[in-house]
Every structure is written in structure tokens, then in C-alpha cells.
Amino acid sequence: MSRKTKTQDVINELFKLFVFRRIPDYIRSDNSPEFTAKEISSWLNRLGGKTLFIEKGSFWENGYIESFNGKMTDELLSREIFATLGEAKVLIEQWQRHYNQVCPCSTGKYQPPLPRLFHL
């Protein structure tokens, strides 16, 4: 298991998302190296998408991810001590499944997120 996200890891995950959803017009992200890499931009351009970066230090421009990061920190990372990387992976995947499939949110009239995906 890796402790660092590589550009190819990002491309692989985006590819999986695009297969199940669609290729977006653009991807908004921060200026982290794995998203600013030329390979990401050229790969997205070949697919018809583009990158859009938030201004450095302007986290409010990406409120969705900031909200997600806060919830993940409050509900998981601040409550757990991971003995191994494997244990961290299992607990994070369990939390992610709960967050994506069970946890209701206000934007969906407090219905679990996953069922709404099938009614687009």
C-alpha cells in the first residue's frame, strides 16, 4: 500500500467514476501536485474535459470537498488510532461506504445519497 497519491492513481480513480457517471465538463480541485500534473490535463483534454483550480488559500471555492473533509475528520480521523495502514484502509472504506450509501444529507431531502444516483 502506498502512502502517497500518484498522478496515475488519480487517473485510475477518475476513469472509474467516468464509467459509472459521465465525463464532466471540468474537474475543480486544489493545486496539489497530483491534480496539477500535465498528464491529468492532457488525459482530460483527450476525453473532452478540463481542469479548474481553486485559488491558493481559497478553500471556500470548493465547499463540497471542505465539508467532506470536515465530516471525515470529525466522524473518523479524530476518533480512531490506526495501528497499521491496512487497518486504516479498512476503517476508511467502511466510513466511505456509510457516507455514500447510508448517511442522509440535506440536499437530498435527508434521503441516503446512493439511491438518488439511480434517479438522475
Image: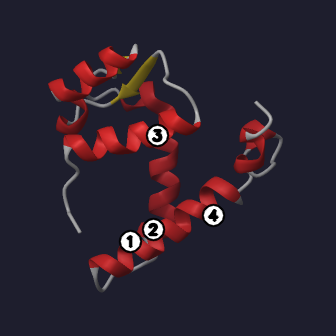
Image quadrant for the C terminus? top right
In primary-sequence order, the first of circles 1 and 3 is 3
In percent of width and height, residue 35 lies at 25, 33
- Check if mark 2's residue and mark 4's residue have beta carbons within 8 Å: no
Image: 64 above or below 89: above
Q: Amino acid at mark 2?
A: Ile
Q: CA distance from mark 4 to mark 3?
A: 17 Å
| Coloring applied to the structure | secondary structure
In primary-sequence order, the first of circles 2 and 4 is 2
Task: Judge from the rendering whether residue 119 lies leftward or rightward of residue 14; answer left or right.
Answer: right
In percent of width and height, residue 97 lies at 59, 62
Element on which disc 2 rests: helix
How many C-alpha atoms fall within 10 Å of the one at disc 2: few (<14), some, or many (≥20)? Answer: some
Tally of numbered tags = 4
Q: Amino acid at mark 1?
A: Lys
Residue at image location 81% in from the left, 47% down from the top: 110
Image: 82 above or below 93: below
Location of mark 1 (residue): 89
In primary-sequence order, the first of circles 4 and 1 is 1
Location of mark 2 (residue): 92
Q: Taking the image as drawn, is residue 8 in sight? A: yes
Q: Taking the image as drawn, is residue 51 in sight? A: no
Q: Amino acid at mark 4?
A: His
Location of mark 3 (residue): 65
Residue at image location 49% in from the left, 21% down from the top: 24
- Check if mark 4's residue and mark 3's residue have beta carbons within 8 Å: no
